[in-house]
Image: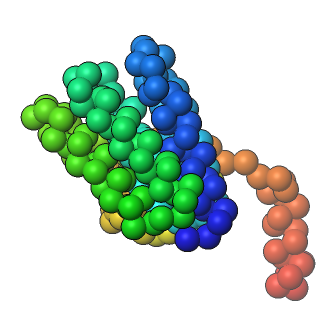
Amino acid sequence: MKEEIRKEILYDLAKAVEIMEVREQKDVEELKVLSDHGIEDVALHKDLDLISVTVLIYSLYKVVQSLKEEEYQEILSQLKFARQYIEKVDLGKYNRSIKNVFGLVQKASPTVREHLQDVMEAAKIKKGTALLQRGLSIGQAAGLMGLSNWDLQQYAAKTPFLSEHWESIAAEKRMMSALKIFGVK
């Protein structure tokens, strides 16, 4: 793992632990903001470990309110372990801790488990759309998020950003340049 990626993951995990340290109503919004921050890193680095952590944080944002206190504390504990292991560059233990957090969220309750599958898929699609907004192609964004182009296209087509289009050069000037290139008068 590249050092820059490790530092980004460490930041995200440390921030998630800080947010969840004391259970408050504002945790939900703070986890959402952290998840949005993570997508910036994913767009920049296109790294699977970053994608995993970003999807995990987004999933926590979606289910944190429905977790029982015991489940909440166990997830927090595993996030702390993951943070410690990534600090020590013990990637094997780090990966196990992240896998444990995903597992804990899934088994927390029947409704959470069912909801998480939807959340995970929705997170991939939503974060894939965010990658499109940052200039990646549908194929690149879908590939990074483990989606088909079709799944991402269906969602992205419903978002307003695809219809928003800004040109820095006026159409008339572009037309003149094209005609000049092809030697048309």
Q: Quadrant of residue 99?
A: bottom left
Quadrant into which the C terminus falls: bottom right
Q: Is residue 103 left or right of residue 109?
A: right
For the point 84% across and 76% down, which residue is it?
179
For the point 83% across and 53% down, which residue is it?
168
- Rendering coords of residue 178 (x, y %): 82, 74
Q: Is residue 178 left or right of residue 110?
A: right
Quadrant into which the N terminus falls: bottom right
Task: State whether residue 138 is above or below residue 18.
Answer: below
Q: Camera-side residue: 151 or 122?
A: 122
Q: How is the image coloured?
A: rainbow
Q: Camera-side residue: 50 or 40?
A: 50
- Rendering coords of residue 161 (x, y %): 56, 43
- Rendering coords of residue 130 (x, y %): 53, 48
Task: State whether residue 151 is above or below residue 35.
Answer: below
Q: Is residue 75 left or right of residue 172?
A: left
Does any portion of residue 25 appear in the rendered image?
yes
For the point 85% across and 56% down, which residue is it?
169
Q: Quadrant of residue 4?
A: bottom right
Q: Is residue 174 left or right of residue 113?
A: right
